[in-house]
Image (cartoon, rainbow, N blue to C red):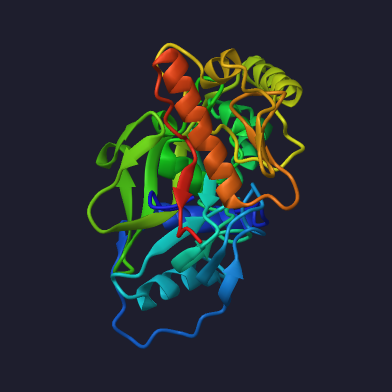
């Protein structure tokens, strides 16, 4: 998943994934091949509606939409792109609002692709960019490893979590990263250490020429007495009770300001349940915007703007959106 944009838990856990992980870990860098490139094996669509691929269920079409068959197919496709092509990476489509005018360039979706997951020694787990964060957390739990339980609270993929340093329940992605495999704009791949990236709250800065993430190795420790697993279950139970997990949303709408919570500020302004068109502030958690059938991206964006303006005028705090807003207005 690229830092310029926003996969589904998939298949491939086991011996095949393990071999893939070991091979990937051993690969320092793969140069661009000068031989003729093979034909694409994935799904390439024109003018594909992104409303069916994003968690808010709103948004216009992508000029081109590509679902790679696998890692190698993705690399072939990226090598075929023009350098100036507008590129948007998509996983589960959470944390993303695509405007009703759509995306003018290419969307690459890792939904169902890049789903390898394997143990990489006693203190690391390898996950490809399309792996659902909750699946990674469960896999670590099955191995009796601690440190990645917070991933169960991230409604996205590993690639997306890397791209925005996603977090939940006090944990963040990048402090647990040992190394990442990246794809450059010219089609090269390489393994980089975490220190090659600068990260902060919900933001990273990538090296020049960076295009997207192929996977990562995460540091874990032994969950000696099962305490980490129990804590994760408690977090999940609290999430189910306090967040609108059954309605279309994009996760947390705003970043928490220093020393405070966006949800508290929104609720203090009496905005729980406030609605514009088909978009509404959740009555369960004020930092979630949920949508109804017939909602538009413009409804969501207007509601975001209204929340920011109201909170700023009444409290002096300027909330910063955690969701990324992309695309053209209609």
Query: Relative to the observer, which residue lies in front, 16 or 205?
Result: 205
Percent position of residue 245, x then y: 73, 34
From what the image shows, is residue 68 above or below residue 209?
below
Residue at figure coordinates x 52%, y 55% from the top left: 99
Quarter where residue 204 is shown: top left
Residue 10 visible in the picture: yes
Query: Relative to the observer, which residue lies in front, 142 or 313?
Result: 313
Query: Relative to the observer, which residue lies in front, 120 or 168?
Result: 168
Percent position of residue 188, x then y: 31, 66
From what the image shows, is residue 201 above or below residue 117?
above
Seen in the image, is 248 located left or right of residue 35? right
Quarter where residue 178 is shown: top left
Percent position of residue 181, x then y: 39, 52
Percent position of residue 198, x then y: 28, 36
Residue at figure coordinates x 61%, y 39% from the top left: 155
| Picture mark count | 0
From what the image shows, is residue 10 above or below residue 34?
above
Residue at figure coordinates x 56%, y 53% from the top left: 91
From what the image shows, is residue 160 above or below residue 144?
below
In the current view of this chain or complex, which residue is farthest to the bottom? 36
Seen in the image, is 73 located left or right of residue 131? left
């Amino acid at each position: 998943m690229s830092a310029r944009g926003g996969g589904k838990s998939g298949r491939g856990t086991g011996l095949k994934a393990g071999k893939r992980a070991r091979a990937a870990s051993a690969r320092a860098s793969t140069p661009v091949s000068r031989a003729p490139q093979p034909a694409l094996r994935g799904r390439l669509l024109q003018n594909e509606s992104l409303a069916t691929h994003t968690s808010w269920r709103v948004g216009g079409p992508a000029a081109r939409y590509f679902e790679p068959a696998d890692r190698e197919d993705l690399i072939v496709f990226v090598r075929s792109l023009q350098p100036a092509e507008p590129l948007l990476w998509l996983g589960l489509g959470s944390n993303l609002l695509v405007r009703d005018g759509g995306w003018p360039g290419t969307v690459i979706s890792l939904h169902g692709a890049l789903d390898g997951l394997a143990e990489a020694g006693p203190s690391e787990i390898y996950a490809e960019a399309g792996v659902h964060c909750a699946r990674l957390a469960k896999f670590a739990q099955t191995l009796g490893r601690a440190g990645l339980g917070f991933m169960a609270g991230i409604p996205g993929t590993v690639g997306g979590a890397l791209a925005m340093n996603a977090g939940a329940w006090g944990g963040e992605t990048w402090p647990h990263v040992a190394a990442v495999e990246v794809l450059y704009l010219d089609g090269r791949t390489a393994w980089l250490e975490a220190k090659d990236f600068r990260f902060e709250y919900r933001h990273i800065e990538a090296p020049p020429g960076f295009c997207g993430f192929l996977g990562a190795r995460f540091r874990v420790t032994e969950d000696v007495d099962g305490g980490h697993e129990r804590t994760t279950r408690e977090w999940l139970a609290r999430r189910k009770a306090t967040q609108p997990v059954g309605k279309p949303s994009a996760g947390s709408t705003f970043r928490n300001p220093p020393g405070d919570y966006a949800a508290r500020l929104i609720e203090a302004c009496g905005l729980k349940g406030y609605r514009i068109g088909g978009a509404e502030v959740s009555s369960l958690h004020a930092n979630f915007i949920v949508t109804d059938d017939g909602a538009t991206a413009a409804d969501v964006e207007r509601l975001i703007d209204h929340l920011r303006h109201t909170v700023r005028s009444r409290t002096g705090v300027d909330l910063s959106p955690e969701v990324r807003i992309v695309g053209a207005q209609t």
